[in-house]
Image (cartoon, rainbow, N blue to C red):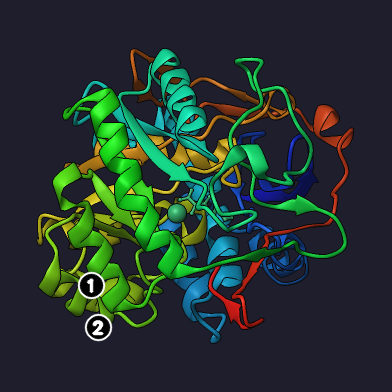
Amino acid sequence: MTTIESAEVIVTSPDRNFVTLRLTTDEGLVGLGDATLNGRELAVVSYLRDHVVPLLLGRDPHRIEDTWQFLYRGAYWRRGPVTMAAIAAVDVALWDLKARAAGMPLYQLLGGASRTGLLAYGHASGRDLPELFDSIRDHLDQGYRAIRIQTGVPGLQTIYGVASNARSAEPTGAAGGGRYDYEPAGRGAQPQEEDWDTRAYLRHLPGVFEAVRGEFGPELPLLHDGHHRMTPIEAARLGKALEPYDLFWLEDCTPAENQQGLRLVRQHTTTPLAIGEVFNTVWDYQTLITEQLIDYVRSAVTHTGGITALRKILDFAAQYQIKSGIHGPTDISPVGMAAALHLDLAIHNFGIQEYMKHGAKTDQVFQQSFRWEDGLLHPGDQPGLGVELDVDEAGQYPYVQAYLPYNRLADGTVHDW
Ligand code: CS2
Ligand code: MG
């Protein structure tokens, strides 16, 4: 029986911080797993190094389900972003290993391809309409067939999702040479405080979508991220106001810890709803799925216990005609992104994949074999995930403290960011 001989937790910060687990067997096979939890990276590093790695050495790498259950039930303290990111890294590394051992791309091990390519969406944004229109045209030029729209709001200084006013880590050259997408985590010893006003946002946003439809027509799939900032009735109002503009989805319209809050949103609007990027287990979805309160599952492989767990959530969602919309921002590493693409290609209920491009330095550290052609993604046909980590290159970029921003209302109250 082959065994896990080494388990390294590799932290690097080319364009932003990433945490990668690298497992090596006594036969020299390597498996990679993403454990990046934006703004709390070192908590997962410690969970892995201090608690999980000692349990992996000497184990049979091929017993993926057993290892998942051992790490989930055996920890006694279940769920939560840190635990589930750590378990995800182990799970994905084991799937990578098994597919490499089998000499096939991971999607083949997951049941083979259910489609030829994966519709993906990119992030267009602007402080005003001219800037937003330029950003949309830039994404169309890059080949995107679906586009997420985020916009500035008059009266607010900084707002989620608008690249041009982000204090991102540092302006980095994207593969396309321009300033790449919006990187929310700012390097520094303290998080940035941002301002928020829901009424100003609700007054402004419908007009922006009216203008975008006017300029780009009725067909282009348009998405928007409400980023957890509205109460259920405010979200219901926005969903209704956006119906004329036929959104592909409205995302995270209200903090979804209150799952039943979505009942009120559903009562008032038919705008499709996507939720789940901050979820960690199937239990976070139970009411949302069984009561048909969402249309897309937004979890990332990296934050939901890996391929083993997310595939089960998507199989559960499929019974309710709910599709995938896997989270794919820059804080999901190329390893986590590759895992998402293999799962996307194999499942039946694929909806769409988020695709923010990583920076040039990141692409040096992580050699990737996925394809982006004519607006469709494909994981590639290399054995395993199809990603190699250059440890020497990674070593040139030590960890840099970075935090996600937080919000305060005009009266100083802390609000969802
Ligand atoms: C966002 C993310 O991509 C999205 O849908 O919600 O950019 C999110 O803000 C970051 O992943 C937080 O780390
Ligand atoms: Mg989001």
Give the quarter of the image for residue 408.
Answer: bottom right
Image coordinates for residue 393, horizontal then vertical, percent: 82, 27
Residue at 30% over, 77% down: 232
Q: Amino acid at mark 2?
A: Gln
Q: Residues within 10 Å of mark 1 (few under 14, many from 20)?
A: many
Q: With 51 as the anchor, is 265 left or right in this view?
A: left
Image coordinates for residue 62, horizontal then vertical, percent: 47, 49
Q: Is residue 108 visible?
A: no
Give the residue pinned by disc 1. Answer: 288
Residue at 65% over, 57% down: 38
Residue at 61% over, 34% down: 29
Give the residue pinned by disc 2. Answer: 260
Image quadrant where one finds the C terminus:
bottom right
Q: With 305 as the anchor, is 232 left or right in this view?
A: left
Image coordinates for residue 70, horizontal then vertical, percent: 50, 72
Depicted 140 relative to depicted 118: above or below: above
Question: 53 or 354: nearer the eye?
Answer: 354
Q: With 10 as the anchor, is 392 left or right in this view?
A: right
- Secondary structure of the residue carrying tag 2 is loop
Give the quarter of the image for residue 213.
Answer: top left
Q: With 266 as the anchor, is 325 left or right in this view?
A: right
Depicted 113 relative to depicted 314: above or below: above
The quadrant where ligand 2 appears is: bottom left
Q: Is residue 366 visible?
A: yes
Q: Amino acid at mark 1?
A: Leu
- Secondary structure of the residue carrying tag 1 is helix
Image coordinates for residue 106, horizontal then vertical, percent: 39, 34
Question: 149 or 214: nearer the eye?
Answer: 214
